Amino acid sequence: SFIFSCEKAKQEKDHRKEAPDQDRRSLAFHHNRRQRQGKQPTPRQQGSTTMTDLDSARSPRFTQWMAFFVFATITMGATIEASNSSSQQDEKATRYESYAKIVTIVTFSVTALIVLLHLNGVTSLFIVGTKLEGLVCIILAGLWAATVAIVSNPRHGIALDENNGIINGNIYYFSWAGFVCSVTLLVSYLRSAFHVDITGEMKNRSARLSYWSALLAASLVVMGASASIYDEECANGGVGSIVKCRRTKFGIGLGAAGTIMSLAIVGMKIATARAPFLIEALFSFLLLICNAFGVSYITSHQGPGAPLGNLYYFSWIAFLSTFMLCASCLEDYNAAKAMSGDASRGPGVVSSPEIQVENMDDTI
């Protein structure tokens, strides 16, 4: 028994000596295996990554709401300052100033609350992708459309003066930026909530529909701004010069013509997904010529659109839209011409240069 006990003690001692070597070999084996397979994240790391992905997925419009908050803040500050320092005696203009101030304050409060809700993954569930967010987007888009119409009216003297020039750049530019941001928010909500891709539908519906829509909007603004200037300076013995009044009339007619033609093309494209190419090309060419003269006459020194304002900017937008329309029509015409040329040669016929064949009789 004594000998058996000694042998057992020796075996345990040898085992204790070999254990560190086995542990080191085991650690080296697992280390090499992790290097070959790639280091796997721990469950905690996996959970944190998943939460980050969920937070980003829960906030598809966070950047747009942040931008809207900034635009509303700047517009609110500029409107309040302009209202406090205004010397308006007209009760109607004062009422419009109060409306613009209330809308900017409400928008500032609502967007600030929505941004705070977006900052947390739990609270964002109460607003992101819900019907409440859609209702807020619709209401804000309508309010800011009315706000842009009010502050851009020279009669009210908020952002534009009597000569249609900008007197407060922050109110003018950031009110338009807020309106555009409200529209993009509404479009983004419709795309995510109801899978209504307005931009994709416009592209797939028919070619050049977006250009015609832009021309329609620009023509409406040109017509409205020209009519406002004409009523203010030319009608009822106004102080406007004869040249300016004539060019203002031209702006009204140009805006009306652009509105009618673009509305007809947009209606045909929406109803039938296409419009006759000859009519579309003819309207595009005529409107390009008219808007080229319109830009030169309306935005010149004696024109009504010389000061920076709605008439100036949208006259140029209308001209650029007609230019893009003509370029697109010309591109389609060239493509159709090339296809018709290939079809006239017949299927399977490939044009190739002539190969000169040597006469064997002459060589012999």
Image (cartoon, helix red, strand yellow):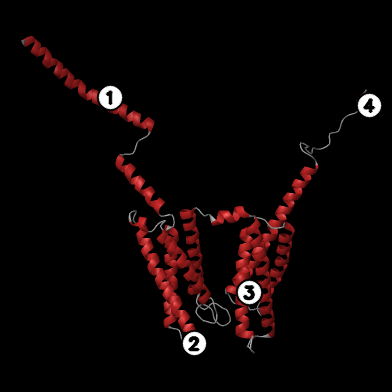
Residue hosting label 4: 362
Secondary structure of the residue carrying numbered label 3: helix
Query: In the displayed image of the protein, which residue is found farthest to the left?
Result: 2
Mark closest to the chain's N terminus, 1 or 4: 1
Residue hosting label 1: 25
Does any portion of residue 306 appear in the rendered image?
A: no
Could you tell me the amino acid type at mark 2?
Answer: Asp
Mark closest to the chain's N terminus, 1 or 2: 1
State how far apart marks 3 and 1 are (Cα): 85 Å
Task: Give the answer, above or below, for where 250 lies relative to 207.
Answer: below
Number of other residues with Cα within 10 Å of mark 1, as a class: few under 14, some 14 to 19, many 20 or more: few
Instruction: Report the number of numbered marks.
Output: 4
Mark closest to the chain's N terminus, 4 or 2: 2
Secondary structure of the residue carrying numbered label 2: loop
Residue 11 x, y percent position in the rendering: 15, 16
Q: Are marks 1 and 4 in contact (CB under 8 Å)?
A: no
Q: Residue at x 38, y 49 (%)?
A: 54
Residue hosting label 3: 223
